[in-house]
Amino acid sequence: MECEMCGEKAPTSRVLIEGAVLNLCPKCAKFGREIARPPRPSIVPQVQGTRGVAAGASRSHAQQWEEPDMLVKGTGGMELSDESPRMIREARQRSGWTQEQLGKMINEKKSVIQLLETGAIRPDDKLIKKLEKTLNVKLKEKSEEK
């Protein structure tokens, strides 16, 4: 690698100098304190259910429907309704908005709205709140005790 201080091409180490972490050659490393390199993240394969998330779809606001419902814990026994895809679509249509218009209103892509309305993805709590507020619908229902 190349030293970030002198530019010399040599093996580098991570060095902390006055609050900055730099990749430095052995000559320049003496000006700071060497720190350990962070471990490389391992690659974990994604398990797809029978209904996968479409290519390019964001998983930041979505989970596959087959994953366990994590919304129940800490929400006072409320969980996402099985009818939420239909409820989202019908509320959007009642308001006279296109998928693209709704997406812009809640700062999401049109493709996310499409996937929500078809039931291909499940919204996280943050997205559920944005949808409920914008569309004036309740997407969560009381869960039955098991």
Image (cartoon, rainbow, N blue to C red):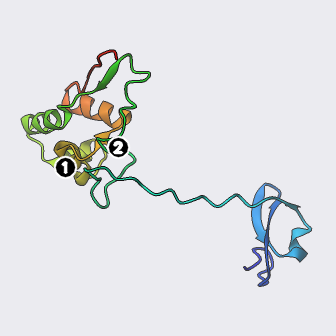
Q: Which residue is mark 1?
A: 114
Q: Residue at x 68, y 58 (%)?
A: 39
Image-based side of 93 in relation to 141, left or right: left
Q: Nearer the viewer, residue 87 or 137?
A: 87
Quarter in which the C terminus is drawn: top left
Q: Marks 2 and 1: which is nearer the front? A: 2
Q: Residue at x 31, y 39 (%)?
A: 123
Any mark on residue 63, and which?
Answer: 2
Q: Point out the residue furthest to the right here.
A: 30
Q: Position of residue 101 (x, y in %)?
A: 18, 47
Q: Secondary structure at mark 2?
A: strand
Q: Residue at x 33, y 15 (%)?
A: 145
Quarter in which the N terminus is drawn: bottom right
Reply above or below: 105 against 130: below
Reply above or below: 13 against 73: below
Q: Nearer the viewer, residue 141 or 23?
A: 141
Image-based side of 38 in relation to 125, left or right: right
Any mark on residue 91, and which?
Answer: none
Disc 2 to disc 1, how far (Cα)?
A: 14 Å
Q: Position of residue 122 (x, y in %)?
A: 29, 40
Q: Residue at x 19, y 51 (%)?
A: 100
Image-based side of 56 in relation to 119, left or right: right
Mark 2 or 1 closer to N-term? 2
Q: Amino acid at mark 2?
A: Gln
Q: How many marks?
A: 2
